[in-house]
Image (cartoon, grey):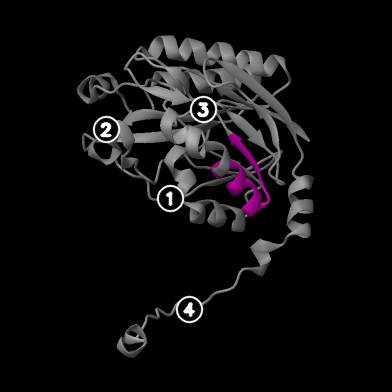
Amino acid sequence: MAKLAVVQMCSGVDVGRNANAMERLVRQAVDQGAVYIQTPEMTGALQRDRAALRASLGDEESDLIISRARSLAKELGVYVHVGSTAIGRPDGKIANRGFLAAPDGSKVCAYDKIHMFDVDLDNGESWRESSAYEAGEAARVASLPFGKLGFAICYDVRFPQLFRTEALAGAEILTVPAAFTRQTGEAHWEILLRARAIENGAFLLAAAQGGKHEDGRETYGHSMIIDPWGRVLAEAPGEGEAVLVADVDVGEVAAARRKIPNLRNARDFSLEEVGLTAERIAV
């Protein structure tokens, strides 16, 4: 069993201030016994001005958020999972990149968000993430002392095949750091998170952005830790910073998967399209 944490933030446009907020929250989680701490999507900055965002970016080696996470991990002897931050690419596009730092400060792995948030919502709210960001192409599962960790970011949660692939590869703890909009969060956030946990018999940790941001957007908050049976172990409010810590025992994953072995029971199948014939329509 291990104490794992998610921290909720309300990142602004100043990367330095956001890095300081991240550090403060990570230290609070470690003070509560956490050995793994996850931050939200776009920990480094929520910035609608794409030109200003690009101008502020460096590569992974020079990024302030990632370097601060690595320093904290080494100083505190814990795993620090930057849910994501914007990283400049040589081709001029941006990677929405998650990064996991080990207790010695080394890189465990990075994960680039696969599914781009290109949507048109009610009330004129529209997003085209693919216009600036380059989609990732590879899922990731990391073997850690307290269990196998699968990676995802925000909009990825709407694509269950990603989580099923990770679960079949052995993932016992699924992660969904996010910056869900208030509109979509109110409708779908908890339902989607609990569904991904239940259908894979896995713990799910989701650190979220929450509140009104400097760039004008509103995010839903409600960071969560969910067990393999779909029970919400901890939940943050809708706005503002929060630290959630829960005991995670991957033995519960094995127990849930024994009770409902849907990962083993899945079968290949064919699809046939059928329709009404002209004769049946006439009747």
Q: Which residue is mark 2?
A: 124
The kind of residue on which mark 2 rests is Gly
Which badge, 4 or 2, is on the more N-terminal residue?
A: 2
Mark closer to the chain start, 3 or 2: 2
Q: Which residues are magenta?
A: 192-205
Which quadrant: the C terminus? Answer: bottom left
In the rendered image, residue 18, in percent from the top left (x then y), is placed at: 44, 14
Q: Residues within 10 Å of mark 3 (few under 14, many from 20)?
A: many
Q: Is residue 196 located in the magenta-colored stretch of the structure?
A: yes
Query: Spatial distance from mark 3 to mark 1, Cα to Cα?
Result: 23 Å
What residue does disc 1 label?
Answer: 138
Q: In the displayed structure, does residue 54 sit left or right of residue 209?
A: left
Q: Is residue 194 left or right of residue 90?
A: right
Amino acid type, callout 3: Ala
As for residue 97 lying within the magenta part, the answer is no
Give the residue pinned by disc 3.
Answer: 208
Residue 66, placed above or below residue 241: below
